[in-house]
Structures are given as C-alpha cells and as structure tokens.
Amino acid sequence: MQNESVIRRRDLLALIGTIAGSSAMYHAMTSLGFASESAYKGPLKLAGDVKGASVLILGAGLAGMTAALELRKAGYKVQILEFNSRSGGRNWSIRGGDSFTELGGFKQTCQFEQGLYLNPGPWRIPYHHRALLDYCRRLNVTLEPFIQLNHNAYLHATRAFGGKPQRFRSIKADFQGGVAELLAKISQQGRLDEFVTKEDQEILLQALRDWGALDRDYKYNANLGSAEFRGYARDPGGGLMGDPLPSDPIPLQELLRSRMWRYLQSFARYDFQMTMFQPIGGMDMIGKAFAREVGDLIRYNSKVTQIQQNGSGVTVSYVDTASPSAVQQATADWCICTIPLPILSQLPVDVARR
Ligand SMILES: Cc1cc2nc3c(=O)[nH]c(=O)nc-3n(C[C@H](O)[C@H](O)[C@H](O)COP(=O)(O)OP(=O)(O)OC[C@H]3O[C@@H](n4cnc5c(N)ncnc54)[C@H](O)[C@@H]3O)c2cc1C
C-alpha cells in the first residue's frame, strides 16, 4: 500500500467499487456505460512490505469491511470508525420488532410477522457482480434466485384502466401486438420501401408475426395465438369444458394512454438482467457475514467530523454518539474513506499530497 503499490491500491479501490461502491459512483458509471462486467478474477492477493503500517477505515458498509478484511489479511493494522451502532451501512434489512429513529427524530417500529423482512437499501445482486458473489461464497452467505420479472404480476396505476390492475403479460403482449400490427400495415402499404429492401421486408413481416403474435393477416386479435402470450379468458384444462377461450386484447390507443408500457423495459436493463440473486433471509446477511470477519475492528457510534492528512499520516476526529463528550482523535498511516459523498462533502477534509 505504500510507495511500491500504486497499481495494487487502484485495484483494491476498483474491487471495492465493484462489490459495493458508492451509489454515486455506481449510477454515474452506469449512465456513462462504464458499469460493465466485473474484471474480478478471484480472491485478491495483496502483496508488499507492510512494515507494520496502519490503516484507518471510515465507514463499516460493505466497502469499508471489504477493505478491512483484505488489508488485515495482508498484514496491516486496521481500525474502522462507524457512525451507526450496526455494521453493513446501506446493506440492511428490517424485520418485525426492529425500530428505527429517522434523522428528524421520528421513531418507527416494524410490525411484520415473523419471517418477513424488508430490504430498504440494496435487494438485488446481478449475475455479473462477480466479486460480491465470490465473497458470498467464501463467507457462507447462502443465495437464492431473485425473481425480477414475473409475467403474472400486476401493473397498477390509479389513472389507468379505472384503477384496475393489469397483468404484466397482457400489457406486454398487447403492446408488442399493437406495434407489430402497425408496422406490418405500413410495410404492406409500401411505406417502408425507402428504408428496407423488399426481401428484408418479407423477413420483417415474419419477425413481426412471431414477436407480436399476429394472425395470418398480420392482425393482432383475440385468438389462441395471442392468448398464449397475454393469457386466456378460460385457461386450457381437462374435462368437457377443457378447451381454452381467448381473451380480448386491450386496444392500442388505450394502452398507449395508460403509459403502462413504461414498465416493460426496466427488467431488460443491464443491471437487472436475469439471473439475479439475493441472500436467503435478507440482504443484511452479507453485512453480517463481513462483520463476523472484521467486527472486532469496528468502533461503533463513532461519527467522523474531520479528516486531516499530512506527510506523516492521517488524523481523524470523531465523536462518540452513544455518550457524546469531547471530540476524540484516531491516527493512522493511511486512511480509506467510504463515507458517502453527500455526507463527506459536508465534512472538513484537509488532505495533502504525500
Ligand atoms: C434504495 C437503494 C437500493 C439499492 N439497490 C441496489 C441493488 O439492488 N443492488 C446493488 O448492487 N446495489 C444497490 N444499491 C447500492 C448499494 O446499496 C451501495 O452501492 C452499497 O451498499 C454502498 O456500500 P458502501 O460501503 O460504499 O456505502 P454504505 O453502505 O453507505 O457505507 C458507508 C458507511 O459509512 C457510515 N458513515 C456515514 N457517515 C459517517 C460518518 N460521518 N462517520 C462514520 N461513519 C459514517 C455509514 O453509517 C455506513 O455504514 C442500492 C442503494 C440504495 C440506497
């Protein structure tokens, strides 16, 4: 971590960003198209001559605890200062009986039944968050698939369809069917000739029929073909009444005005593509697993108020929120700060180049 390992330090930061990161970094990278597949290739191997150097880590979220785990393994003397009385940061789950006092002082108590929980922060692990998945495996966090896309789920908007919820599958099939029928129509009228060759228009028509569940005349109608996607008025079954009945598509105009098409694409976004995972029992199983490894390094209820760095190291001022008294100070050779930027930007930080 000292002079000889600029690349290694950068690698570590990249790793931290990959498995947890700050949401600012995450969202900025996503919108810039940089949040691509993780380059993680297996457990980190930090090397170098530590010479008894110390590292002060600010924040016991996943980033801070990952850094602590790896740096202690590499031989550094590590301490973490954490504002909360628990670890995990945004990686958090709330269960029945838990209470939480909001920043304004309002206290809420969760009244869920046993076995139910809510993840107020992260809840989905994409398949390409390889580092996090690997840490889960190494720290014995059991995962289960996260069902991100459920065609049987309802979409609901108070101002659409008189407030009546609609099945995701019906909205999707009817939107695709309506758009496919329109496009087929203008293709057959020759209004695409300027843009698409005759041969390609033939292929396009085949594709539209498949994609939109159109009938032989390229119409989207109530029939067993469209029902296969949008759902039946009477499901296929057995016995005398076993034959299925098709359901009526929602007219395209109504569908467009409902604005429900907005929700069709969110499941296809790169970060949300299947397969996704979640820890069994709540997202905080990950934070708890990290805390089993590095909990002894964490000083809880320690609110960092100032960070100063000079040629000889870092001095961090903090107050004990459990029993506020005089400002205390912690020093180290190095500091890794994982305090989220909106908070960090309010703190006096004096960081000189070393
Ligand atoms: C609503 C929501 C949904 C999300 N959904 C997903 C998702 O589905 N999948 C996904 O991969 N990511 C998701 N994210 C992003 C993910 O939660 C974060 O990227 C990740 O948890 C950040 O970890 P971190 O350790 O960098 O920060 P944090 O978890 O924020 O940790 C920072 C720590 O610093 C502490 N701290 C703050 N101020 C001080 C101070 N002054 N002194 C001492 N300590 C301090 C905090 O208490 C906290 O423990 C979501 C985030 C949110 C908010």
Image: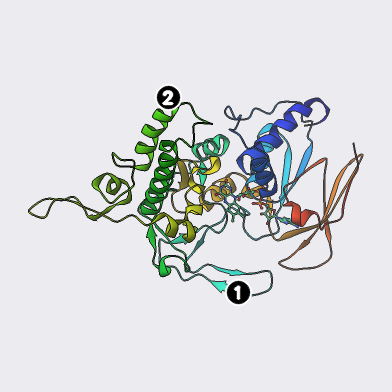
* Numbered badge on residue 107: 1
Q: Amino acid at mark 2?
A: Glu
User: Can you give x and y, in whole percent of width and height, for residue 322 in the image?
Assistant: 71, 67
Residue 137, above or below 290: above
Of callouts 2 and 1, the N-terminal one:
1
| Viewer-closest of 202 and 13 | 202
Callout 1: SS: strand
Question: Taking the image as drawn, is residue 145 in sight?
Answer: no
Total marks shown come to 2
| Viewer-closest of 150 and 214 | 214
Circle 2 sits on which residue?
199
Q: Amino acid at mark 1?
A: Lys
The residue at the point 18 percent across, 51 percent down is 244
The residue at the point 51 percent across, 53 percent down is 262
User: Can you give x and y, in whole percent of width and height, for residue 138 in the image?
Assistant: 52, 36
Label 1 within 8 A of ligand 1 by Cβ = no
* Figure colour scheme: rainbow
Which quadrant of the figure contains the N terminus?
top right
Which quadrant of the figure contains the C terminus?
top right
Q: Mark 1 Cα within 10 Å, few/some/many (few <14, many 20+)? A: few
Residue 153, above or below 187: below
